Image (cartoon, rainbow, N blue to C red):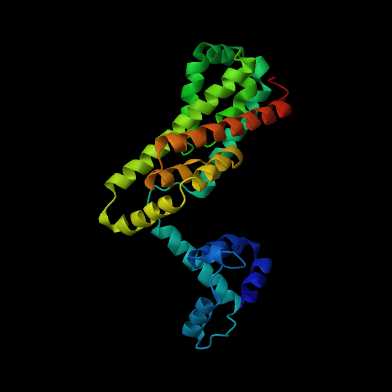
Amino acid sequence: MYRPFLLLALRRPRLWPALLSSAWAFRPRDWYRRPPFLPLPSRAYMRWRLETAYGEPDAVPPADEIARFVTWSADMRRRMRPRGRVPLVVKLLAVAGLVAFMVWVNLRAGDMEGARDAAAAAGYPGLLLASVISGFNVVWPVPVATFYPFFIESGLEPVPTLATIAVGMTGGDLLGYLIGSTTRDISSYRLARFRARAEALHDRHRFLPLGLLFLYAAFVPLPNELLVIPMAYMRYSMPAVMTAVLFGNAIFNTMMAMGVSLIFGAGG
């Protein structure tokens, strides 16, 4: 059933974005619960679409018609997006620019006397503020720990630097927790069912999510807010969530700092 779409993808690579967009748009809600655990349209849905279009559930649509449909549907979804939304390509380029800036700063740390003096003058309070901003990943998606070699070249000490970064990033995660808590308090009655399910989940599993949050913060290079905000919504206590995040951040930033130190030959 998927063979015509796969053949089209092989023959026309330029259609990959439109094909992937269509597959994601028509994915089943519970695709991650059933094998092959891929966000692909269900066979029942595909058969229904083919029957309504061609009068036969096993029909094989021509390649040109598939190309026109997926291109048109992808264009319609783009037109329906809210205005002012930043395209994904722009976001990826921005992140790539930040990574390139990080590499340049660490490579040139020994030659940037003015920047090192400014970092030394800002000291640990300035590093704490930068870490809070970095901890709230929607603002600065590149961890501040990636600049660890530059901070060491600026005269900061390794252990206080890592501790300050961990505390500051936990402060950024605290903002995410407060957002989740506030959202819960001001949410409308339409979210009452979700709120009830969240509370039931909290009652059944009080400690397991905290352990998973610690492992996530320690080893997963994604924003902690993806877990912190829902856990705040589920009324997990702030001290418990922040403790798990703090220890996870300490491990994550230590590994990150040691990694960039090995790459750029700084730190210690």
Does any portion of residue 29 appear in the rendered image? yes
Q: Residue at x 29, y 45 (%)?
A: 185
Depth check: 136 or 64 in front? 136
Q: Residue at x 50, y 26 (%)?
A: 167
Depth check: 200 or 174 in front? 200
Does any portion of residue 222 appear in the rendered image? no
Describe residue 186's horizontal placement relative to residue 163 as left or right. left
Q: Where 67 sits versus 181, above or below?
A: below
Horizontal and vertical percent position of residue 182: 32, 41
The residue lying furthest to the bottom in this view is: 55
**Quarter of image, res 252:** top right
Describe residue 6's horizontal placement relative to residue 228 as left or right. right
Describe residue 253's horizontal placement relative to residue 242 as left or right. right
Quadrant containing the N terminus is bottom right
Q: Where 153 sits versus 53, above or below?
A: above
Q: Residue at x 49, y 37 (%)?
A: 137
Horizontal and vertical percent position of residue 220: 59, 42
Q: Where 175 sits versus 110, above or below?
A: below
Horizontal and vertical percent position of residue 261: 69, 26
Horizontal and vertical percent position of residue 228: 45, 42
**Quarter of image, res 97:** top right
